[in-house]
Image (spheres, helix red, strand yellow):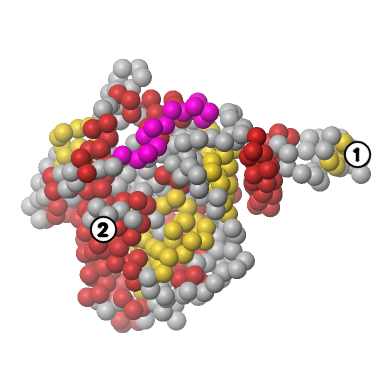
Amino acid sequence: MPSNILFLMTDQHRADTLGAYGNALAATPVLDELARTGTRFDRWYTPTAICTPARASLLTGQAPFRHRVLANHERNVGYREDLAEGTFTFVEALRENGYNTGLVGKWHAGTEKNAADFGFDGPDLPGWHNPVENEDYLGFLRERDLPPYRISDRIRGTLPNGGPGNLLAARLHQPVEATFEYYLATRTIELLEQYAADTERDGKPFFLELNFFGPHLPYIVPDAYFDMFDPEQIELPKSIAETFEGKPPVQRNYSAHWTFDTMPLEVTRKLIAIYWGYVALIDEQIGRVMDALERLGLVDDTAVFFTCDHGEFTGSHRLHDKGPAMYEDIYRTPGILRVPGGRAGQVRTEFVSLLDATATILDLAGIDPSPAIDSRSLLPMARGEQQPDWAQDIVCEFHGHHFPYPQRMLRDDHHKLVVNPDSVNELYDLHADPDELLNVYDHPEMVPVRQRMMKRLYTVLRERGDNFYHWMTTMYDVGEVDYDPTQSGLDETTYRVSGDEASLA
């Protein structure tokens, strides 16, 4: 029988903010309980650390290079802004198979088309941050005689041109019941009740997605969360010692753009403390939805996902937000899945992706997941089954934010390779240097690792059809090349290159 599905998603969320992922100070009892009763994936990665492309990948089960929605509308540099007509999406497949489908919260998977265009019920809430001027939200406040959005205690640095930096955090002068997060949970519960009635009456299954806009910066929360954690108890990330020596210069530039060095470290501690408070606020609102799921008698028949689109720096590597740096802080994210009949309390260490959620949703609904071409179902793992043929590594990609900036990454158990065509490549020994401070790409002893990983990345990209591999063909030792890399079309032959020799076949 098809399962109901509740999909809980945050934005720009670090894995290490959750108790289930090892944060001893975290105030995340609801998500920790979900991990205790389900499966926590320890190596859950985003396909790309940028909102819109990642969300489009979830919708389609396609890697970003394939669906070609490669940048956020707000910082678009000429890429496609909406999925092409006729692109497969899981929501349309669910509706065709009798599902109610709802989405409450952040859409941000396209510009001209909204969630309703793909078949989602729920309020239209466009944009990248809490749309506090949205009429549905303002009506929610008026109906309950709640005060509007107002902030103080703004935290920001100074830009290289002397102007004010991006707003990073602020104190919100509203009670919890008036926050946008509370509003989103309320609208989700209302839709859940409606869907539960349909299930009770007609046996109609549902997919319901709750997308919070936070804890994406700026972290704007009421007093109780702004001051929940003592900054003196915050341990700064070790990568705050970043010097950018041997790193792509864009990282130093991005640090300046995010004004890190214009603020004292005490401010960084406070920002991390507020960020954790924001996560606590969201956890409480998820708790309200989970309570409603139990009250409606749906727990045993409903699969529950929790994840996000990508991570957040919060001072790591002297950076904020996300951007052209493929560090674990923004690529490794939380991923929790509880399914009916699944194994409770397990931790899986396979490399999995937000992309894999698409095939899993389809699998839970009894729908062929193969149209989600870059996605693999996690359902067998959630049931405790071994997966001996699962890949021992993962590939991620980036295409730019503010400016075009192509990158590809291969991460395995021990090392991470990042190819940066415009700059220096990166190689990290994640066992010896988990904070990714030392780029060992040019270290002589790493040549065998570098060659092995470069060839593996090249092979995966070619198999996928990601044309980034063309750059790698001519620039790196990737083994025998079995095609004409010039693509000239001027010969009837194919160049076969082996070492320094070229022969005509």
Q: Main secondary structure of the magenta part?
A: loop
What residue is drawn where x is 35% and y is 51%? 16
User: SS class of the residue under badge 1?
Assistant: strand
Q: Does residue 239 sit above or below 310 in this rendering? A: above
What residue is drawn where x is 30% and y is 24%? 262
Query: Rounded to the nearest whole Å, what is the CA distance between mark 2 and mark 1?
Result: 62 Å
Q: Nearer the viewer, residue 363 or 482?
A: 482
Residue stretch in magenta: 236-249
Counting from the top left corner in percent of width and height, residue 403 is at 49, 30
What residue is drawn where x is 37% and y is 34%? 240
User: SS class of the residue under badge 2?
Assistant: loop
Identify the mark at residue 200; answer none if there is no mark. Answer: none
Q: Does residue 128 sit above or below 286 in this rendering? A: above
Q: Give the image quarter of residue 286.
A: bottom left
Q: Does residue 347 sit above or below 498 in this rendering? A: below
Q: Which residue is mark 2?
A: 28
Which residue, as the protein is rendered here, is positioned at the far top?
162
- Residue type at the position of mark 2: Thr
Q: Nearer the viewer, residue 235 or 8?
A: 235
Quadrant showing the C terminus: top right
Q: Which residue is mark 1?
A: 503
Q: Nearer the viewer, residue 375 or 434?
A: 434
Quadrant showing the N terminus: bottom left
Counting from the top left corner in percent of width and height, residue 72 is at 43, 40
Counting from the top left corner in percent of width and height, residue 371 is at 58, 63
Inspect this view and state whether residue 95 appears.
no
- Residue type at the position of mark 1: Ser
Q: Nearer the viewer, mark 2 or mark 1?
A: 2
Left or right side of 452 for 351: left
Q: Dot 2: few (<14), some (14–19), or many (≥20) neighbours within 10 Å?
A: many
